[in-house]
Amino acid sequence: MNLKQQDLVLSSQFAQDLSKPLDVDGKKVSIGFYNIVVNIAQLRMNIETGLIPNRHWKLKTIKTYYCISGSKEVMLKKLRFIKKEMLCL
């Protein structure tokens, strides 16, 4: 991701959700981190099997939430990169 794309991600709804806590099995996790893990799994399932996670699932939702663009494969790479960077912090 280039610098312009990183700025877009930092101004997205995802960046705002990183500071909101969520209780998952008694542990505090940010809503943004939870969403990125779930979205990576759903996108991967769609690419590998062609299945749609639920009837309301759309790529447009993921694109607007993270302010990213591209094909399914490109979006998966970008989401994995974002998650990897989050874990390094």
Image (cartoon, helix red, strand yellow):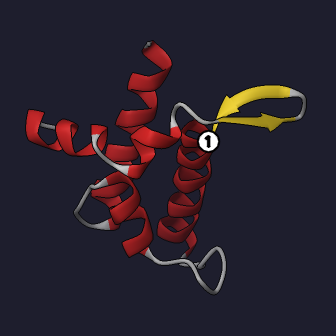
Q: Residue at x 23, y 61 (%)?
A: 69
Q: Would you place residue 12 above or below residue 4 in this image?
A: below
Binning the other alpha carbons within 10 Å of mark 1 as few (below 14), some (14 to 19) or many (20 upward) gives some
| Farthest residue, direction top | 89
In the figure, residue 11 lies in which quadrant?
Answer: top left
Q: Which residue is mark 1?
A: 31
Task: Find numbered disc 1 in the image and state the secondary structure of the residue it sits on.
Answer: helix
Amino acid type, mark 1: Ile
Q: Would you place residue 17 above or below residue 57 in this image?
A: above
| Farthest residue, direction bottom | 55
**In-image side of 53 versus 16 (left or right):** right
Q: Nearer the viewer, residue 43 or 7?
A: 7
Q: Nearer the viewer, residue 10 or 5?
A: 10
Q: Measured from the top left, where is residue 5 in percent x and y?
A: 16, 43
In the figure, residue 71 lies in which quadrant?
Answer: bottom left
Q: Measured from the top left, where is residue 17 in percent x and y?
A: 52, 42
Q: Measured from the top left, where is residue 84 in percent x and y?
A: 43, 27
Q: Residue at x 40, y 45 (%)?
A: 79
Q: Residue at x 53, y 45 (%)?
A: 36
The C terminus lies in quadrant: top left
